[in-house]
Each structure stands twice: as C-alpha cells, then as structure tokens.
C-alpha cells in the first residue's frame, strides 16, 4: 500500500478516535446534569429527576436515530454521532427548569419533540447546509458573512434555555415558591449540596470535551492547536465567570455570603458563553467573556424571580443567559474580525448575523415549545396534582423513595433518636 | 528516518494511546460498579461493599500480574493490560450478588481465583489461541467457523454471572428476604437511589470504552469506523433495553410504576448483550437486541426470585441474562453471516459454535466457582454470623460506619428532632 | 503537500490531542479531591470544603495565567497547560489538611501564592531550564546527572505536602482532636464514607492520566510504550500499597479492622510514590515501591498524630510520605542506573541529586508557606472563631447547609421520628 493511502487511513482513524472519546465525555455530561439537578430538588423528588436524566440519553438515542435519520439535512455538517450527544444536552436543560412538578408522560413528549425535531432543524440551519451556515455574500472586500456558533452557545444552550423558560412559565411555580402580594421568595432549598457539586464537577469536565470536540477533526493542520485553544479559553472563561459570580453574590444586595451553588452556576454560564467562539478568541477575551457571563447569569436569575417564574436550577439563567452572551460577544471578541479588533462594516454585519441567528433560534424554539407545552397543558397532563406535588413524586409515581427510611440504621439515625 | 518507519512508529503509538485511554475508562467502571452496589445495600453494609470494589481493581492488578503472567497462553490475542481491566469486571459482578452477607476473607479468595484463574483460562480459549478462537475448518464454501465474542458477552459477563449465581445460591438469601411457605418477597431496599444512579451513569460511560476499546487497535484500515459502530450500537441497544425494561415494569403484573432502578439495570443488560457483536451489527439489529435484552433481564430477575436465590443487585439477570442474549443473538443478527441475513449451513454452524462457547464457559465457571464457594462454605468462612448480618458488616468488620451519626448536625437532623 | 509535512502535522496534532485528553482527566482529579475531602469532614463543613475545591481549578486557572505567564522560565520544559492542571493539585492538597477551621479568605491567599509563585518556581527548577533539570556534568563515564522526577512526586506532592504540614501546624488542631495531657485522640469522623470513596475512585482514574500524561508527547518513538509502562506501574504500585496498608492496619496495634479509608489513602500514596519514576521501572520494582509507600503512609500518619498536628485527610502522610518515597526510591529502582541494578559512583551521585532536589523543594516550600501562613496568622485571618468552628462553617459563611433539613421528608426521616 502506498504511503499516501496509509496516511489517509491514519487520518481517518484518528479523527474517529477523537470523536468517539469526546463523544463519550459529552455523554457523561448527562451524569453531571443528573446530579446537579438531583442535588437541587427536595428529597421527595430525587428519583423522579434522576429517571428523567437517565432516560434523556436513551430518548435522544432513539429520537435522533429514528426521526433525525429521516431528516437528511441534519446529517450534513457536524458529525452525526456528536450531534446526538448534543441533543441530549438540549433536552436535559429543560428537565431542570420543570423539576418537582412536571408529569412523567409530559417529560417524554417534550424530550422527543426537542431532540427529534426542534433541535435537528436548528442544527441544520446553523451547522448543516441551512441559511445560517450559508449566510450572505456581500461581495467585494467583505465576502460571505454567516452566523458563527462553534460549539452551540445558541444552537444548544439558547434553544434549551428558551424551551426551559416556556416550560417553567406554563407549568407555574412550585407550591410555596412565590406568595401572592408578597416579595418574599420561598427558598425551596435542594436536598444535597455535595450531590449538586458532583454534578457541577462532572459538567466542568464534560464541557471541555463539548467545546474542544466541536472541532470535529484532529488530523488536519491546526486542528490540535484549535482544540487546545478551545479548551484553554473555556477554562479561562469559566474561571472568571466563577470568580465574578462569587464576588457579585458576596455583595450586600445579594446576601453577603460565599455561595457555592452560585459559583458553580456562574462557572457553567462561563462555559456556555465560551461555546460560540472559544476557538477564535485570545485568552484575555475569554476572561472578559467570563465576567460578562457572570453578570448575565445574575441578571437573568433576577429577572426570572421578578417574573415569578420558578426555575429550580436557574437553568434559564445559565443556558439562555450564557448562550446569548456568547453569541453576541463573539461578534466583538473574535480575534480576526471582531468589532473590538476591526470596527468596520464587515464586523457590523457579523453582529447583525449573530442577532439574526439568535432571533431565529429563539423564535423557532419558543414557537414549538409553546405548542408542545401548551397542548400538554390543555390536556391536563403537564403538571402533577397538588396532592402528589405535596407528597413528592418519588413514591406515588416510582415507588422508589430516594432514601428509604427502612434501609438506614445501625450507627446512623437511631442512636440520635434514642 | 524513512517515512515508512515514521508511519510505523505513529501507528504503534496511537494504538497504545487508544488502549491506554480506553483502559483507563474501563478501570473507572470499577467506580460505577461500586456505587451501583453501594446504593443497593442498606446503610449498615455500605463500607463493606465499597472496600470490596476498591480492592477489586487491586486484587486483579496483583492476581493478573502474578498468576496470569505465568500463563503465557493468556497473553496472546487481546492486549494484556486491557484484559486485566476486564478481569476486575468479572470479579466485581460477583460482589453484587453476594452483598450484605459474605465474609471479607471469602471475598479475597473468590476474587483471586476468578481473576487469576477462571477468567484467564476462558480468555485463552476465546481470545487467545484456544479452541474457541480457532473453531473448526468445515472446508469448502464454509471454511473456518469459530466462537464469536467481540467484547465478552460470554467471556466476561456470562462467566461473571455464573459465578455470581453459584455464590448467591451457596450463600443463601439475606435474613428477611424470603419467608418459608410464603410467596411474599421481602423488599430489602437499597439505602440510596442517587448513589445507585451514579453507579449506573458511570457504567454507561465505561461500557462505551469496554465495547469500543475491544477493537484493540485504531491504526489499521477500518478500525476507527469499527470503534464508532461499536459505540453507536452499544448506545442503541442500551436505549431500547432501557425503554423496554421501563415499559415492561410499568405493566400491571410488575407493579405499575416507572422504576428507575429497573431502567438502569435494563440499559446495562442491553450494553452487556451488545458486547458479543456490536462491531458486526446494523443499528436496527442493535435495537432488536436491546428489546430482547430487556425481556431477558425481566425473565432472569423473575427466575431468581422463583428459585429463592437472593441477588441484591440483580447481577445475574443483568450479566448472565444479557450475556447469553448477546452470545446467541449475534448468530442471528451478524450483518455478514447471521441467520436472519443468510440462512444456510454456515450460519447454522455459527449458532452451534455460539452454543458450544456458552456451554464451555458456563460449565467451566460453574465448576470452579462451585469448588471455591463450596470449600469456603465447608470451612465456615463463606457467610458472616447471623448476629453480624443483623448488625451490619460496617461496624464489626471495618469500624467505619458509612454515615457516622456523630458527624452530622447543625442544620441537618437535630433541628428536626428538637 | 509533501508526505513528510503531512506526517509532521499528524504528529503535532496527536501530541496535542494526547495532552488535551490527559489534561481533562487531570482536571477531573479536582472532583476526586473535593469528594475525598468532603467525605472526611463533618456535615457542618461540607459546603466550605467543596467551594474551596471548586475554586481551586479556577484560582489556578487565573493565577497560572496571570502570574506564571510573566515568569517565562516556567514556560520551558513541560507543556504549559498540563502544568496548570498540576498546579491545582498542589493547592488542593493543602485544603485537606486545613479543613474545618481555615478562613475562606486565607484559603484564597495561600492558593494564589502556591499556584502562582511557590509551585511555578519549582517547576522551573525541575522541569524547565533550572538547576535541578540541568544537574551537573561529572565528565568521563558518568556524564550529566540531574534530579529525576517524571510526574512530580517531589515537584507536586512533596511541595503540596510541605505546605499542608505548615498550614496545619500553624492553624492548630480542630477543637476536640487532641486533649492536653492525654494520649487519647479524638476521632472526628468524616460524615460520609461513600462520598470519600467516590473521591478515591476518581483520583485512581485521574492519577493514571497524571502519570501517563507526564510523557507529554505520544508521537515519537517509544512514547506509546512509555505511557503504557507508566500507567501499568502506577496500577501495580497502587495495588501493593493498598494491600500493604490494608494489612498493616489490620494488625492489632493499629486497630484490627479492615479499614476502607486507610486502603484508599494507601493506594493513593502508592500512586504518589510512582510519579517520580513510573516510566523507568520494572513491574516488580513498582510492587516494591508500593509496599514502601504503604509503610511510609503509616509512618507519617503516626508521626503527625504524635506531633499533635491535626490533618483531617492524612494529606501530609499521603503526599509528603508518598512523595519522598518516590523521589528517594527511584534512585534505587531505576531500571537503567538505579543502585539496585548498578551500584557505582554514578548511581550514588544520582541518589545525592534526589536528596538535593528534595531538600530544595522542602526548603523552598517550607519557607514561603511559613511566610504566607505566618502573615495570615499575625493578621488574625487564618482561623475562624471558636464559635463558628463549633457551629460549622457552612451556615455562617456560606448560608448553604449541605443537607438542609427542610428539604428532607416524605419517606425519609419523619416516619422514623413519628
């Protein structure tokens, strides 16, 4: 066999190796989401949130395989198997926002629609051969300009965040969260900080694969460097976002404490924001991006509370807030043609395309998630009964209390009680 | 240096890189097993099950290094270091089935024998240069036919499942599990659903490496594609098995609830079943396989209860049930010469060899695990005393209660009690 | 493009791929440390220890990027991004030793100084272009001899261990740990064995990347083999250290129980000891090393208690104890010029350089950590007040109890109480 063919074989193989290992790490993010969410709910709803997260991977596996396979458009562009792993992420964002009150059957409905329809269409637009990836040819010095979204700040996270917003709004808040005619917000604390922190750590790990893996190949010139830059920028953005959130929350108006959960959410927001252009940024731009992400997180978290929309995980603030920060700021921070580096008509048009992409993604996902959640609400299968919500979903729906009392003893609780 | 030598060096290196990273992920499966098992036992036995799982990796490390090193036969075929990681899996399957009542010293005995003897011999047969890998030359159009077991549905999982069955049967059920003259089965619930789910998620991740890594090389033509196909088929099989199990368990006769633990076990069964031929299947075959795996899991789980054999983890149903499904069905579903695609003498003989392999593996592992567990039972070192079982193993054996009551307080339990 | 250039591109890319994936796994070790530490503290201090571990990655990200970027010396030698991940490890070792009583603001101070100054200087000495990496040219048959520390037994772990020792000594023991005029040691048990075990498992996984990844490249001749050897030796050393610790602790004088936590710490000590020369050892040398590591762990753990220095995690015993074992024993066990293989002036000088390196690292890190912790103590910001220590740090400092009592119920604790 000729050396050239040999080389080609190696290139093909290491690309596939790269995608497999990155894809595995992205699938593992599902575990991260599961525990971030499980720690943030009360003990009576833990099994319910876990089964949703377990099923997310498998629902996406089936939905993507059955539905998206017949949408040939989604196949172009990004590697199909990696897209599947991203689909699960989009669906899982929603499960956080609708936690502790959503019917199990409604969960199946929206997951299938998001992973099998809403999301594949947007990937076609932005990563396949659709209008967002094509952009428009402005001729002359400017040339082709298109929507830029390397790892999906918009395609995955804004989309998921919008669906989460609609879902949470149509479901209504959990009992005890908001009191009519009062500004006091019920703090329905999650049941386990370590479980939530475990989820956060796993997501920090997985996000590096999410953003690094979006390069899709490792065999061509510059691939390795691009992957490394993406990973480093993701870390820097997360670091500054974590610090920013920690400090903002330490201010008096936000409660004057060093909050772990806010720090974790802040870091995640920084990673979400990095998705759009972590491959096209200087490290200091990533630092700036992280600080903006921290502010965006705090802003959207506050907005949600003002709107009396109950999002137990702050999923909208993290994913929608981080996503739009990333999509918009890359038009300023792109090291080649960002507005800060090159203020001309070209970079202005670029910003325009980012807004166009955002508008399309928000409009599309809002429309169809309104439809899905609206229909489910009309048929009365969106929200569990008040009685079940009070009692918790684990025992009535799953007959699996997360911590069955009869399984404890001998050194644990009895001693205390005696 | 010539280009050809350079190419050869790169090929060697990326193969080793591939094996190292896959091996690491497979070793991490040990963590998955540990938590799946820890969540499924009562709080009084958590430390005991965890130390067994921690030691599994290290016992295998030593046993495989000392014993198997001197069994040169085991060295051929599959890469030795990867085999070591598979050995730990075989041993760990057993610890689930004998949980909450097995002596610590008995654990050491059976682990050493399984990882250092029972398992290496079978790997020699099926993956080294033994009779199962050689098969038989039927001449003419048919040619060589041999036992097919890509990632070890039989070699690892049926073997582990048989040892688990024998161990659980000889140990007898936990106190309170089965009542004489009654069909009511005591539901000795595990103490923590999230801990079990964590184990499940980690195993989902690790299994992709287990099945994908079994390709062993990544540098030759088609390797990358084979690895990707294996991983995708493993996911599809798991997805359909998870759904299948979830739905079957939702039926009235099985309790009418959406069970998380059943879903996790179902998905794992689907992955176990995929081991045998995930590299040689169409996606839809993997879907079919997953559905059969779900049924096999339910069947074997029921059989175990009917036999009054107490398997706290359903390890036999997952590994034995999934393993035989995989070994047998690949004779039907193999895309080249499976019975469904090519019904002739060749595919019939192939099925015969799958049965021969199964019979050999079951016979061999049954014989020696009977011997090991039998001897341990004769010497009275197999099962802890009734008193210790009642009290839990953690304090008498390890002096490390999993959740020491004196370590809690200040915002947790006291408030409630006051 | 010529084949040679193509080859060069592939080599560059797979090297970067290797560093990215190994770096990701090393970053994930932060999760391992977090949970090892969280399980080992009481429930009232869990959020506090977790936020420190979450911030470690991000503090290192910022410190290393801002400070070390301007120390060009640190850039040479080892790959910069991998160094960052090692920096986080050095800082995190300290957080274990000072757990449950250290001020949050003091944590920031020492973390920045360690990751931004103490550690980068040592990496320059030993891995960059400093005096330890240069060594001395003895001429003749002997030639250049230098300090050997492949993955940082000394550079990372002895350094971290010394800072941990100084920090714990200056802070003083937790309330209730040591009684004046009594030899009875208060056993302030950690609150969750499974959480600690989770941390251990993750560290076992991450350490393989830590040691294997220290090869830094995968594209040159012998790289793959070196990485594989490093990983295998790390596993063997850990296996024997785990067994050794388990057995030593089973002896009557140490309590006569099978301790899980000791086994985990023992295995980690074996891995720490393997850092220095896992790429230059025969497997049986790794076994010997593991046994010495087990003894060193027990020794240093005992010494710390005798000195009445309170190290809740045994971090000093694991990292300092394991680190010096590794640095010293590699002079005996190196397969090319270790004293056991080649007793001559060369191997003697080699041992001398190992001691010189140790002395320099210990002196340097002791000096500056004394300075940092001393200054913090003078200003009264090192240790929390007695009242807060009693109450636990989580509520006063973070307003986030790890297990908020109001989040539990319905099947968990109430039933028991009623």
Image (cartoon, coloured by chain):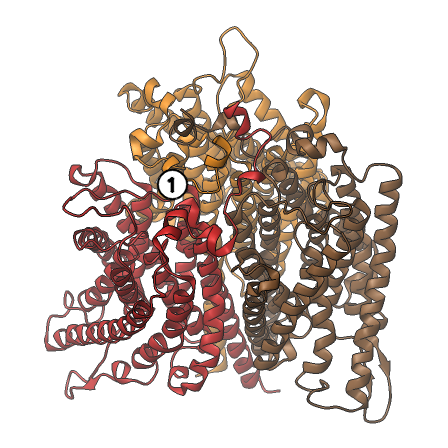
Chain colours: A red, B brown, C orange
Q: In which quadrant will I find the N terminus of chain B?
A: bottom right
Q: Residue at x 61, y 61 (%)?
A: B254
**Badge 1 element:** helix
Furthest toward the front, the residue is B181
**According to the image, label 1 marks what residue?**
C407
Count numbered badges in the picture. Answer: 1
Give the x, y percent position of residue C76.
40, 51
Give the x, y percent position of residue C324.
57, 33
The answer to whether A386 is drawn above or below residue C349 in the figure is: below
**Nearer to the camera, B1 or C159:** C159
Q: Counting other residues with Cα less than 10 Å from the Cα at mark 1, is it few (<14), some (14-19), or many (20 or more)?
A: some
Q: In which quadrant will I find the C terminus of chain B?
A: top left
Q: Residue at x 14, y 77 (%)?
A: A349
The answer to whether B109 is drawn above or below residue C96 in the figure is: below
C331 left or right, relative to C166: right
Q: Residue at x 18, y 76 (%)?
A: A356
Furthest toward the bottom, the residue is B141
**Nearer to the camera, B138 or C143:** B138
Subunit that carries the residue with mark 1: C
Give the x, y percent position of residue A47.
47, 52
Name the image quarter holding residue A99.
bottom left
Name the image quarter holding residue A243.
top left
Furthest toward the left, the residue is A344
B177 left or right, relative to C4: right
């Amino acid at each position: 066999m000729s050396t050239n063919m040999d080389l080609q074989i190696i290139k093909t193989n290491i690309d596939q190796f790269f995608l497999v290992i990155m894809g595995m790490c992205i699938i593992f993010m599902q575990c991260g989401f599961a525990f971030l969410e499980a720690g943030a709910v009360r003990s009576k709803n833990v099994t319910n949130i876990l089964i949703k997260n377990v099923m997310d991977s498998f629902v996406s596996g089936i939905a993507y395989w059955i539905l998206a396979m017949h949408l040939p458009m989604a196949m172009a562009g990004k590697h199909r198997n990696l897209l599947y792993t991203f689909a699960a992420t989009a669906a899982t964002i929603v499960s956080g926002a609708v936690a502790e009150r959503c019917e199990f059957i409604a969960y199946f409905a929206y997951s299938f629609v998001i992973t099998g329809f809403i999301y594949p269409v947007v990937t076609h637009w932005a990563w396949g051969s659709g209008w967002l990836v094509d952009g428009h040819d402005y001729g002359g010095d400017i040339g082709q300009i298109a929507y830029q979204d390397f790892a999906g700040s918009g395609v995955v996270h804004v989309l998921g965040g919008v669906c989460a917003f609609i879902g949470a709004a149509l479901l209504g808040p959990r009992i005890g969260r908001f009191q009519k005619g009062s500004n006091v917000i019920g703090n329905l604390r999650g049941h386990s900080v370590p479980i939530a922190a475990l989820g956060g750590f796993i997501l920090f790990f997985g996000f590096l694969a999410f953003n690094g893996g979006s390069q899709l190949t490792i065999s061509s010139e510059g691939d390795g460097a691009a992957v490394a830059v993406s990973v480093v920028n993701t870390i820097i953005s997360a670091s500054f976002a974590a610090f920013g959130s920690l400090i903002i929350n330490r201010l008096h108006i936000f409660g004057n404490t060093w909050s772990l959960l806010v720090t974790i959410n802040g870091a995640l927001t920084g990673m979400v924001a990095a998705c759009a252009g972590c491959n096209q940024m200087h490290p200091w731009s990533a630092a700036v991006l992280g600080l903006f992400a921290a502010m965006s997180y705090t802003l959207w978290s506050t907005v949600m509370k003002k709107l009396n929309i109950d999002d137990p995980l702050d999923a909208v603030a993290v994913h929608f807030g981080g996503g739009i920060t990333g999509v918009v700021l890359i038009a300023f921070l792109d090291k080649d043609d960002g507005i800060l580096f090159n203020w001309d008509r070209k970079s202005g048009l670029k910003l325009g395309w980012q807004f166009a992409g955002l508008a399309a993604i928000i409009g599309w996902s809002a429309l169809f998630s309104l439809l899905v959640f609206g229909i489910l609400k009309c048929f009365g299968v969106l929200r569990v009964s008040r009685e079940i919500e009070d009692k918790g979903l684990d025992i009535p729906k799953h007959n699996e209390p997360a911590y069955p009392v009869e399984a404890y003893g001998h050194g644990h609780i009895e001693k205390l009680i005696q």
